[in-house]
Image (cartoon, helix red, strand yellow):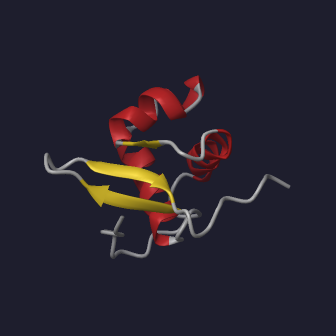
Amino acid sequence: MSNKFTKNVTIAEAKPDIATSILAYLRQHPQAADTLRGIVSWWLPQQHRDAAYQHVEQALAALVVEGKLCSTELPNGDVLYALNRHTKPRPPN
């Protein structure tokens, strides 16, 4: 998987609550991989499902930049996101 994001986006600049929800899902499902649409539909708790796709995409970009997620562009142009196997998310404090 490759990191296609070049802009330095941080979790603080994105939506930290959405990023936290994504990482929580991946702690429970470390083999999961999905597109933006699938992440919004399946990974996020109900309170974040109405979030603008842009906010979720910003959180995903920040997680990729920080090395917590990997991204792969699919042939149809969608991006597949998954846990970066080299760095696992830490449990919440």
Quarter of the rendering occupied by the C terminus: bottom right
Q: Position of residue 48 (x, y in %)?
A: 54, 32
Q: Nearer the viewer, residue 74 or 50?
A: 74
Q: Residue furthest right?
A: 93
Please say if 63 is above or below 33: below
What residue is shown at x 39% (from left), y 37% (from top)? 52
Residue at 59% from the left image edge and 28% from the top image edge: 45
Q: Is residue 31 left or right of residue 24?
A: left
Name which quarter of the figure residue 36 lies in: top left
Q: Where residue 23 sits in the image (x, y, percent)?
A: 62, 49
- Measuring from the top left, give residue 16's x and y in whole percent: 61, 53
* Residue 15 x/y as whole percent: 54, 51
In this view of the protein, which residue sits in the foreground, 28 or 60?
28
Locate the N terminus by quadrant: bottom left
Q: State the residue in front, 23 or 29.
A: 29
Height in image: 84 above or below 79? below
Above or below 83: residue 31: above
> In the orientation shown, which residue stands out farthest toward the top?
46
Point 54% across, 33% down: residue = 44
The residue at 38%/33% (across/down) is 38
